[in-house]
Amino acid sequence: MWAFINKLRSPRWFYAISARLQPYFWVAATALILVGTVWGLAFAPADYQQGNSFRIIYVHVPAAFLAQSIFVSMAVAAVVFMVWKIKIADMAAAVMAPLGAAMTFIALFSGAVWGVPTWGTWWMWDARLTSMLILLFLYFGVIALRGAFASRDSGSRAASVLAMVGVINIPIIKYSVEWWHTLHQPATFTVTGRVAMPLEMWAPLLLMVLGFYSFFIALTLMRTRNEILRRESRKRWVRDLAGGEH
Amino acid sequence: MQHAERLAVTEPRGGLGVALAATLRRDLMLLMRRRSEVMNPLVFFALVITLFPLGISPDAELLAIVAPGLLWVAALLATLLSLDSLFRADFEDGCLEQMLLAPQPLALMVMAKVAVHWLLTGLPLALMAPLLGITLSLPAGSYGILSLSLALGTASLSLIGAIGAALTVGLARGGVLLSLLVLPLYVPVLIFGTGAVQAALLGDALAAHLAILGALLAGALMLAPWAIAASLRISING
């Protein structure tokens, strides 16, 4: 166990092992998303109430899942970095943040587009929309704080603290926003009103969710590898690598 | 023997209690000498509240509906405004480094600073809010709750905000960043703070809202000091 953790400390080892893992996740992501998209958009039956507009779910739900999962994984990486000083964890956290913000934006945007045919408006101060918007601001805060420091190490540690503070607050914000929503305005339309999807509808959704997660893992591996090369560019093994390939 | 004696000389006298009292007294005294810094958030609070009737409508009925939210948001922004100076002066003259070096735990010493911040920002805001409530024709019967919810809420705001202030104290232009970091975290306090005032207006049970405000404060009291201390270490060593 400890040998494994010690190995994880070595960027060089991670660089080698991720090169072997990466293709599997790319293949899985491409296959799952392709099949899920074609199945969901062309073959899944139309919703009896919402018609074809419900198909936005195949982008919206996976993106919303990822938006929240990425923040949690970022915070876990931050804890690992702060406690065990494993630099790879910080590199992963650094490359995850923009992807998480992008996913939050996609979830918000697809939700807004979906809102037009179903609610008749682009935006509603719905509990979920609002907590997603706040999540987007939390991502912006983490990204901006990391960039604000002159020294990279300080930026890393500050962003880690903020990610940890944020992840403790996310459930509190989520539940208080839900309470606020029931307090201020009765829910006119809720997404949860749609219950018990038939198999033909949720199977492609499941594929899409799995595909999005594979994509997240593959992209994080790839970008962490780039980050390793960037940060370790003065190290001997990186120079050898660059020299060997040229 | 001689060695032990020499150690005894450098050992802190009186321990934690003395250090906390000294920090409290020092910070209170420093702020009382810079009265404008204490007055600024209050003036800002009054000014922002003055802008709302100008921007929305002088209609008393309309203002009464939005008053709890306006008062809370304005008080929240006034707290935010005062955060930047929480650690700034101590950071610049090196006092923070001394606090870091002191044998007393930084997390507790920081609590004394945050307590002073609340005493001279949050509490005055809470006491001033009913006065501004009158100008917004906030219905009678909710003034006590307005003050109480603000007093409870601003304590959480000071604690949470201090994390952001500690993270940005080493940055030259931390002000805008500070609001980006802190405002999303203020959402729950705002929701339950205005919720309490509105419950009082509607005659609903408000104990639940106040209890949650208290719970948020308890949670912040427990966790925020560690985050503040860690952030200060990062800002000073970085």
Image (cartoon, rainbow, N blue to C red):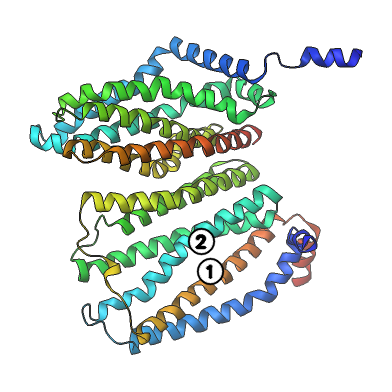
How dense is the environment of label 1, judged by Cα within 10 Å: few (below 14), some, or many (20 and up)? many
Residue occupying image coordinates x 71% and y 16%: B12
Chain letter belonging to callout 1: A
The quarter of the displayed image where residue A129 is located: bottom left
Q: Is residue B88 visible to the viewer in this orientation of the structure?
A: no
> Helix or strand or loop: what does disc 1 sit on?
helix
Name the mark on residue A216.
1
Residue occupying image coordinates x 30% and y 75%: A195
User: Where's residue A201, x and y in %?
Assistant: 35, 83
User: Where's residue B181, x and y in %?
Assistant: 45, 42
CA separation in Å, label 1 and label 2: 8 Å
Is the Cβ of the residue at disc 1 closer than 8 Å to that at disc 2? yes
Chain letter belonging to callout 2: A
Left/right of residue A156 with respect to residue A106 in the rendered view: right
Q: Quadrant of the C terminus of chain B?
A: top right
User: For mark 2, what is the residue?
Assistant: A70
- Residue reaching furthest right? B1
User: Where's residue A93, x and y in %?
Assistant: 58, 56
> Helix or strand or loop: what does disc 2 sit on?
helix
Q: Quadrant of the N terminus of chain B?
A: top right
How dense is the environment of label 2, judged by Cα within 10 Å: few (below 14), some, or many (20 and up)? many
